[in-house]
Image (cartoon, rainbow, N blue to C red):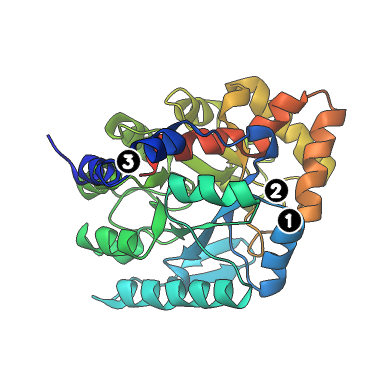
Amino acid sequence: MITRRNFIKGSMIATLPLNAFHTWKERPISPPAFSFDLHCHPGSASTYQDMKKHKLSSAFVSLVADRPLLKRTETGIIPTRSYQPGEGWKEFETQWQAIKDLMNEAEVIPISSYHDLTKTQETHNFAPFIACEGGDFLEDSTDYLELAYDRGVRSVQLVHYAPNALGDLQTYDPKHHGLSAFGKNVVKKMNDLGMIIDVAHASFETVKGVVETSTDPIILSHSLLKRRPFMPISARAITEEHAKLVATHGGVIGMWPSGLSTSIDDFADSTLRLVDMIGIDHVGIGSDMDSNYKPVIKNYTDFFQWTELLSTKGLSDTEIAKIQGGNALRVLQMVLI
């Protein structure tokens, strides 16, 4: 069957000269020089300047699809209502434009393909992708997914804090028994389009449904292993079984430097625990920059201090390169058109 994804790839190849195809497919991005933040919310031009200053290669800069539905409390973030028809997509467009405007102010140009990424790495320019946290804007229609794709969105986190039609969350009572029928359609459509599926915030059963449905590797952009169950935010941590489910299907888990760690050193130790559990090829970082709960990584100086700590704790340069961005790069290359 000819999918849109295969058609686009074929069209791109047909319009390139032979030597250009060779260059595009075989020019490697050097993982030791590559760094990628799987999940962040830059809230000011100064954060983008920090990214550029420290030569971060790329990132998923994410809007928050259910933001108007949420309320922060002493025990965590809770949903307060549901979207009215059309409201979710309107909110998506508002936030998408705000991200574009801030990038323009910071003189940052977003990219939308692996080919774009290879070109920006030749000049060592920071070049992010746009992502969306929560599929709430879809409103039971994959048509909105195509509209988001046309606006440059290349990763969608299926669920966030507000219950939606795609699947169950870690932090809310289940109502779909995992990934819903609509959620399966969304996963298949994302595979067709060449979009990266993010299962952060999703329940174990939802993640299980995703890996059983997806033909591409996935990411779990920001979490870490369960350690401190007495903290309300611990509901966002994952079990060994949960982590291995993502890894055994070729995925990458972004370490989350939240208040579940007591310090950046403690966070580095948590990183090593995850490496020991699922293997070096499946660990990355999702900083949640500018939107995290009691972060132990507050800026990109801290980001690279974390990699230095991993070195002092025994990881080789090759291993650190994988965590810093090489593992994310593998998924980007496999999934993006």
Q: Which residue is mark 1?
A: 295
Name the residue located 72 percent from the left edge and 34 percent from the top edge.
Answer: 270
Q: At numbered mark 3, what does the secondary structure look like: helix, strand or loop?
A: loop
- The residue furthest left is 1
Residue 141 can be seen, yes or no: no
Residue 113 drawn at (x, y percent): 42, 50
Residue type highlighted by circle 2: Pro
Q: Is residue 215 left or right of residue 79?
A: left
| Mark 1 or mark 3: whose residue is earlier in sequence | 3
Q: Is residue 315 left or right of residue 187?
A: right
Name the residue located 66 percent from the left edge and 25 percent from the top edge.
Answer: 275
Is the Cβ of the residue at disc 1 closer than 8 Å to that at disc 2?
yes
Q: Which residue is mark 2?
A: 257
Residue type highlighted by circle 3: Gly
Image mark for residue 212: none
Q: At numbered mark 2, what does the secondary structure look like: helix, strand or loop?
A: loop
Q: Is label 2 or label 3 in front?
A: 2
Q: Nearer the viewer, residue 119 or 91?
A: 119
- For the residues labelled 1 and 2, the Cα–Cα distance comes to 6 Å
Q: Nearer the viewer, residue 335 or 157?
A: 335
Q: Which residue is mark 3?
A: 178
Question: Compared to 205, does 39 lie above or below?
Answer: below
| Mark 2 or mark 3: whose residue is earlier in sequence | 3
Name the residue located 66 percent from the left edge and 74 percent from the top edge.
Answer: 44
Q: Which quarter of the rendered picture does the N terminus lie within?
A: top left
* Quadrant housing residue 152: bottom left
Is the Cβ of the residue at disc 1 closer than 8 Å to that at disc 3?
no
Q: Which quarter of the rendered picture does the C terminus lie within?
A: top left
Residue 73 can be seen, yes or no: yes
| Mark 1 or mark 2: whose residue is earlier in sequence | 2
Residue type highlighted by circle 1: Pro
- For the residues labelled 1 and 3, the Cα–Cα distance comes to 30 Å
